[in-house]
Image: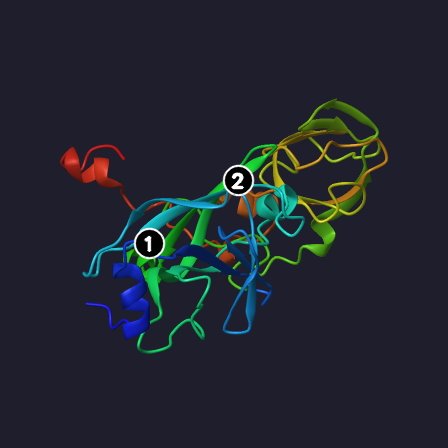
Amino acid sequence: MLNLSDRFRQNIESETPSLARFWLITRKDGVSLAYTNHDEPVAVGGVVYLPLDGFTANNTNQTNTLAVDNTEISSVLTDDRITEKDLIGGVFDSARVDIFDANPLEPPGGIGENPLAYIPILINGVLGRVETTDIDFRAEVSSRLFRLDQKIGELTSKSCRAQLGDNRCTVNLTPFTFTGTVTQIVSPIFFFSLGLSQPFQFFSNGLITFTSGANEGFETEVAFSTIDQVLLFEEPPNDLSIGDTYTIVAGCNKSREVCRDKFQNAINFQGEPDVPGNLFYANGGQGQ
């Protein structure tokens, strides 16, 4: 049972309670964005919550067990501080989200005060998967308990579990990193880049980062590459333009053969391709 302050309890139990919803999003870089569905700015604990039309929390699921509480937030992209580019680019990944209801005419002194002068909807949540359109976005928010559902440790796998260039892989990416320029655009995800001379599929599964133009800083995976041609896995948030520059890193499909032949790094391969799979045991020791 919530330990509510007497004055706040009187408000919510009255025939005409005064309540508004508040959202506080705190990014990993420390930047905070605070919103309310009240029609005027409201200060809570030194943070000013700005009115934002269309900001809602839907499908809220809360329990008093160790089950993961979750909700979904959505909003029209009307605030310049929440852009489609930043949402797609991961700026808001794993941001903290606090959602609560309070009296906007007598706001609480802050989140965490006791007794409570607000109703907690989801405190210390984590922003998860984000979907965007041209005009709005929708994001999943889970409580911190979701970390209890995560697997700790590793399972054996035929493919490598390291990331190309990390401290387990140890490959020096400098000789495998190249720069280029968009010279012809075929579609939002497919372009020509004259001078990109590496052979068929050299950059497939690699990373490309745009270093100029409207998509500067945007990073995505390469789906396909051949001489002078690049196909992206993901459409950039903005249209490509001729003259956009980028850096591109060779791809690794995480097979032992590519690790050995392309990167000469078989000694650091982090997979077990010779361990029999489930089918081997299901068939009584026959097949893989």
Image quadrant in which the N terminus is located: bottom left
Classify residue 190 as left or right of residue 102.
right
The residue that appears at 34% across and 45% down in the rendered structure is 274
Image quadrant in which the C terminus is located: top left
- Residue that extends furthest to the front in the rendered view of this protein: 15
Q: Nearer the viewer, residue 128 or 109?
A: 109
The residue that appears at 56% across and 56% down in the rendered structure is 40
For badge 1, the amino acid type reads Thr
Q: Specify the quadrant of the image occupied by residue 226.
A: top right
Classify residue 27 as left or right of residue 247.
left
Query: What residue is shown with label 1?
Result: 16
Instruction: Give neighbour class at mark 1: few <14, some 14-19, many 20+ (Cα, 10 Å).
Output: few
Q: Specify the quadrant of the image occupied by residue 142.
A: bottom left
Q: Specify the quadrant of the image occupied by residue 167.
A: bottom right
The residue that appears at 45% across and 53% down in the rendered structure is 127
Q: Nearer the viewer, residue 281 or 55?
A: 55
For numbered disc 2, what is the local secondary structure?
strand
Query: What residue is shown with label 2?
Result: 137
For badge 2, the amino acid type reads Phe
Give the mark nearer the N terminus: 1 vs 2: 1
